Amino acid sequence: MPLDKSIKKVLVIGSGPIVIGQAAEFDYSGTQACRAIKEEGIEVVLVNSNPATIMTDRGMATKTYIEPLTAEYIERIIERERPDSVIAGMGGQTGLNLACELFDKGVFEKYNMKVIGTSIESIKEGEDRDSFKRLMERTNQPIAPSEIVTNLEDGRVFAEKIGYPVIIRPAYTLGGTGGGIAENPEELETILTQGLHLSRVGQCLLEKSIAGWKEIEFEVMRDGAGNCITICSMENVDPVGVHTGDSIVVAPALTLADKEYQMLRKAAIDIINSIEIKGGCNVQFALNPKSFEYAVIEINPRVSRSSALASKATGYPIAKIASKIALGYNLDEIVNAVTGKTFACFEPTIDYVVTKIPKWPFDKFFGARRRLGTKMMATGEVMSIANSFEASLLKGVRSLEIKQYTLERESSKNRSMKELRQRVCVPDDERLFDLAELIRRKYHIEKINDLTGIDMFFLKKISAIVEAEEELKKYTIDTIDTDTMRRYKKMGFSDKGMAELMGCHADEVYKKRIAEGVTPVYKMVDTCAGEFEAVSPYYYSTYDEVTESFRSDKKKVIVIGSGPIRIGQGIEFDYCSVHSVLSLEKADVETIIINNNPETVSTDFDTSDKLYFEPLTEEDVYNIITLEKPDGVILQFGGQTAIKLANFLAEMNVPVLGTQPKYIDEAEDREKFDDMLEKLNIKRPQGKAVWTVQEGIEEANRLEYPLLVRPSYVLGGQGMEITRNEKDLVRYLTDAFKKDNKNPVLIDRYLGGREIEVDAICDGTDVLIPGIMEHLERAGIHSGDSVSIYPPQHIPQHIIDKIEDVTYRIALELNVIGMINIQFIEFKDELYIIEVNPRSSRTVPYITKVTNVPVIDIATRIMLGEKLADMGYKSGIAPITNTVAIKVPVFSTEKLPKVEVTLGPEMRSTGEVLGIGMNFEEAMFKGFMAAKTTIPKPGSTILATIRDYDKEDFLPLAKRCHECGCKFIATSGTAAMLKENGIDCQVAKKIAEGVPNILDVIRSGIVDMIIDIPTKTNDVNSDGFKIRRTAIESDITIMTSLDTFGALVKVMECNYSTDSVNVISLDDIEIQDK
Amino acid sequence: MKGQLILENGQRFTGELFGAIKNIVGEIVFTTGMTGYQEELTDPSFAGQIVTMTFPLIGNYGINLDDNEAKHTSLKALVVREKCDYPSNFRNEMNIADFLEEEGVVGIEGIDTRALTRIIRDYGCMTAVIMQGEPSQAEVDALMAEFDNSKVILETTTDASYVVNPGGKPHIAYIDLGTKEGIIRDLVKRGCKLTVFRADVKADEILAAEPDMVFLSNGPGDPLDAPGTIDTVKALIGKLPICGICMGHQLIGLALGCRSQKLTFGHHGGNHPVKYSETGKCFITSQNHNYVLTDYPEDVEEWFTNVNDKTCEGIRHKKYPIMSVQFHPEASPGPLDTSWVFDRFLKEVK
């Protein structure tokens, strides 16, 4: 059937903030969906609370709402926009759940909307555990013995019946949140209790463990006429037992014979036919490695992380095709955009090996339990393409940015054989390297296969890499011959990796390699293994002889992407890269993207003129530069990943567009930076590096408490603390020097003032500040974790003037061409500077959307030589808009066991939401709603435990809560203070005081929110840590900053409700009349 | 041992030889399946051909004797980027290299198979040789000149006729043009008795066996090289239901008055979409052919069409119970989506 002409306006629901289990892949799919629908002349109404996304850009949808993702809000948007249709499967689990909820409430019926694409009935059949089971029975598909339980007792009985280990999977949760494998009744009780709590419908599936079977996935498509195709098969290197999001995955499946492959393919098609999917669907299988026995694990009737991977692995745009199917088209009516000749109704075939490796956040969360299981923990992933498994794996490893260029890892080398054996059995983020180390020490790989279930095929390949590494150690740069060199390059070794093994410098390997003509060629990803000529220039490198990528004569610029999503470097940078490309395209420049993240829009086959899916190391990037000889390379938009390349590219005389590398260096170097500030007469908090405890005490007395202390060798705020007295300082310093006495500790005066952030654009003459952002929380909390407010609400004019002046002077002094990000503190009416980043920052998408200033477009044009004045901008702060827009961070701490929850100098958030209102309170209300923060109501119970230092500040807030009718439960100290001040309050026992104690109170469900201002953090044994973890695991809002709590109280006093606030689209944001 | 693959157009690829070490000449084709190398190795339709695998890793799951599609291999050589020496699968019985050696098939690895595929795509199928070392152009030319694949059907058909599943019903006169066992398996699975005849069987012989249907198998080469079989089919039109697959389909078409045409590089792989004229539905099929039917006479209609290049994927006679498909409903290797076509065929005898 061709296009359904009755569809005029489609509602697309996004996936909300980036959290573990739901990341950039839904920006990719949502963006494709918006484009695919709009190009048919159909209007798109988009709702997504995540301002960092590309899909929420002006012009992507017809009308964009960055509003809270709740059924009530969406109903208000529906009421205003009156779309005639809704597409449910584009916004991940969040979008799907919301669509189900709206359907159940009769909202779609009320507004006469039809669900296009896969129907709600079909979705439920796949998603609801019970009906899934019935579906499998009906289609004669085997599943592991399982039962849905809604209470603990039933769970126990069933587990006894099928025997341990038992897998627990809560229904309707993201990335398997709350699930796990229980080896015994005690573990069952813990996991099941939590799982039942987290499931939206209070259901958990208990299932006999088939751990050790092969885990195989199929991405399948079906249209309204019942045409079915499979896009791609994927095989997890880690067998069943590790969440697919935490597994190393290869595509296509590499160890299946045709009989097994076709058996599973047919099963996948039978299933989607029977529930009449209209669009994409993911089917996961467990396959017994010793027989044809298999079991269906689950199906996802929507686009997913796996479908994004499958799209990038094959070149087949799943979300786009799924959208076209929803609009009525059949697969044989949709042209394959990659070949331009064939149709979407075919199965991609690939002639290379794709490897996906997860990127875990354990470098940020050093206390976390790193054991991988059925709950996903990775924040992002890298993908690599090569024509052997070895090369694909090695490319993937070096894409991770964990300083690994071979499989030889220092930490694994330091482990005993027994330790290694133990570790490969209990998977964590270092398993690959532990495996390699065991193999290196001649441990039998058959035994590893026994212990881990990892297929011998993969173990033999890893073993081949290890053998090659050992062999290479016998060579030196002088003895290695051309053929050997070529053999290693073909196998996927990097210059750096080879250099490490031969004991020389990467540069020597590079020089010798070039002298002997060992250079890569580029092959195309074309969906058809070369059978048809392809028109989409999407490439990967190999060391073959024939290349398919040729340099054009056009003016060209390479934009370096930002690699895998991780804490501190998220989707924002993909937003910047993509916008830079769009801007370059407008300037008629040929655009080339290099990136390795399969989840993103930047790696979509039609975003840039040319896409290189390659690691972002110096070597891999330079190889492409050698071929393309670009007129410039843009680094500013790829986060630290790209900035790291600046000095190298400068050394190689590659033209870097925008701020020159030596100036980037100047801002990153602390000493040079201090000199510059001094020269410009700009204040920064005073501080010094100290080497002994005594020196620290002296320095402290000079600077005055409180002090910000941190080890000098770590980045990103790790180990940073605020000390308020000598006792704390001595404890910190003693501890720090015990751990490491080779590096100093930095002591800075802590200014408990207001943090302010600006992103500015400089052309060398003028400096435009699109907007100033004010942080809600006082200094000391990482800027990425603070609530950020635009336009500023509490900053006096003279400070704003000062910000404008300082930004202007710094940008010019640093010779910034393009973006700069500066962070300030306003303390006792004085302005201090704390950080300068000569690049695009994570606030750029947010500030772009709320100020109406196309920040990246302007910055890119400046890099191409235009001036702000030519574009109609001048120095200073851009006119402010008529709304208040507040960015609220969102955390994934519930997904990471044993991780500290408290806000502090280390960034912990994975994503963000935006609240847009006509005033501060309204915007804050919407921001809290969007972040799923509980806003207390009359009768709500607040559990408070406040450190002594902050009790005074807490009291007025407590009084106001009390006046609004909230009740308090508190620990003894806080309770005493409240009672003294006439606020009635229950006392909760401390953990050591027996049961029921404060943890029981939290678990009982009577507490609506918790305010916990801790004295000490990161101590897993402290009461505070346990309280916070229990709160997170019980899904109760917890505040660890009085400033945030203060804003919450303010919002509560306004008595807002979903019905009473304004529904605001991006089009409603206008420049304020002065 | 080093060896070279040399194409008719003069291009040379150097690689490492494995399997049987000898000099051979054949027609070079590529196949895009990501699994199923074993079924392809043993598919008689590849007789006389040098088969390039576009998927780079071949031999991962080894060889098991149960998945062979014929008693022996018929292809001349296998061209791969990388063969697997340490296969892993619960049914694995031997390595691909040892299997090729045992079967006398030449293998060559370390070839830039993607570059090779693109050449075949642009130039079409060519004659090619695989030789040890670096042969002179004269040696290459001499070997090239030896190539003649016109007798290939008679070389791959059965030596003598035989019966499969004697107690079965209906009774099918099965003309073996170089059959895959998969087709026989699918018919037997549906209860049929098969009397398997040689490709040069005469119509009288078939009629004497009193079958309920005539079925023509797949097979290698150019359909015009089998004029005898075409005559046999001509003589049976209107007398018995006639069905066929691949080469069988082409011979039925030629007997009915269609023409055949050679495609540039053919269809080889498991991902080809066809559209079924009776419902408009599309199916993903397994294919392995270089020729297609064109120019149907009045009483023949197109039954299936290739979605990509719109070539003929099946025909049906408007009056008589005659129908055939170009693709392989028996899969092996490839998708199982069209196995219902066998049921459709068999409806013609009931």
Image (cartoon, rainbow, N blue to C red):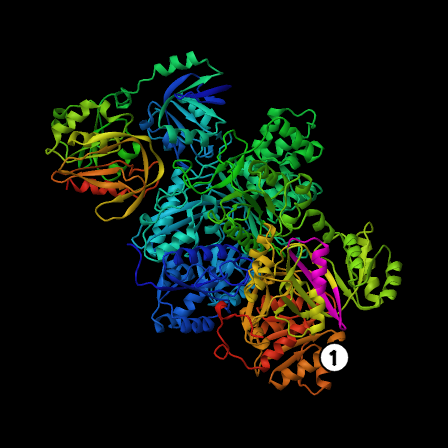
- Quadrant housing residue A700: bottom right
Query: Residue B85, relative to residue A526: is it above or below?
Result: above
Residue A535: x and y in percent read 42, 41
Decide whether residue B103 is among the magenta residues: no
One can see residue A905 in this view: no
Decide whether residue A830 is among the magenta residues: yes
Residue B172: x and y in percent read 18, 33
Does residue A629 appear left or right of residue A301 in this picture?
A: right
Query: Residue A695, relative to residue A990: is it above or below?
Result: above
Q: In the image, what residue type sits under mark 1?
A: Glu
Q: Nearer the viewer, residue A821 or A697?
A: A821
Q: Secondary structure at mark 1?
A: helix
Which segment did they paint magenta?
A805-832
Q: Nearer the viewer, residue A647 or B22?
A: A647
- Quadrant housing residue B174: top left
One can see residue A786 in this view: yes
